[in-house]
Image: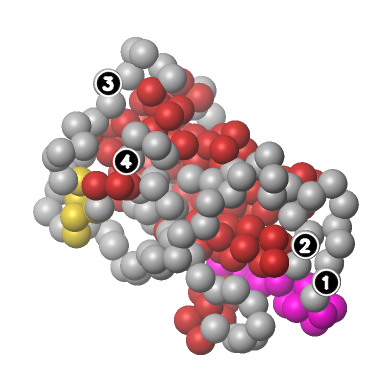
Amino acid sequence: MPSLYCSLLLLTLGALSVNAGVVLRRQDLDPESSVYKLLASNSTISLPDLSVPLVNTTTTDVRGDVPDTTDLTTDVLSVTTSAVTASDVSATNTFLFSVTLPVFLAAKAVGVPTTLDWTDDGCSYSPDYPAGFNFLSSCKRHDFGYRNFKAQSRFTEANRLLIDDNLKKDLYNECGTYGWVQREICEGIADVYYEAVRAFGGL
């Protein structure tokens, strides 16, 4: 597995690559984003010029537009104090941890159960498709976890770790669809995303 430094370098190189395709939004590498801050913390890495449009060729989905800012100093609870129905808690756990990502996305597409929060903002201010890898679907399920656990007053540090670990699992599953060279690069970038979400509570 690549070191964190190599992962950061690979993410930067991926962000700099330009191919014909769909243009990523400028805020995908906003200086305030957690991934950008991680990159900036290593002075040996040249950060990309944000005035240059970034593109990729594999976009198959679009991110949501409902932002969610997690403040780890106020949002994380010491204990679970769920004030919602047991069925909502069960459904949230099922769609987050038990079903495959395609099944989750199918449920999200129709918004059922309607009592759950299905909104997302993709990978927030980080690229949805870094170096062409599809991280968007995994980010959508991660948003689902954070938003519903907060709404259900279950957003403890232990539960946040479970949600973040599930993001890493989903990202690694995406990486596993590629050959070994691309998989190593993909997993390196996935590690950066995971470290960012653990450090900042969001991407």
Which numbered circle lies on residue 83?
A: 1
Q: Amino acid at mark 2?
A: Ser
The image quadrant that residue 50 belongs to is top left
Please indicate whether residue 90 sits to the left or right of residue 135 in the image.
right
Say which amino acid is labelled 3: Ser
Q: Secondary structure at mark 4?
A: helix
Q: Extreme front residue here? A: 74
Give neighbour class at mark 1: few <14, some 14-19, many 20+ (Cα, 10 Å). few
The residue located at (57%, 38%) in the rendering is 200
**Marks 1 and 4: which is nearer the front?**
1
Q: Which residues are magenta?
A: 85-102
The residue carrying mark 4 is 29
Q: Mark 1 or 2 closer to N-term?
A: 1
In this rendered view, identify the residue nearer to me: 135 or 77: 77
Tag 1: amino acid: Ala
Considering the numbered disc 3 on the image, is that residue within a helix, a strand or a loop?
loop
- Front: mark 3 or 1: 1
Residue wearing tag 2: 153
The reply to whether the magenta stretch includes residue 98 is: yes
In the rendered structure, which disc, 2 or 4, sits on the residue that comes first in sequence?
4
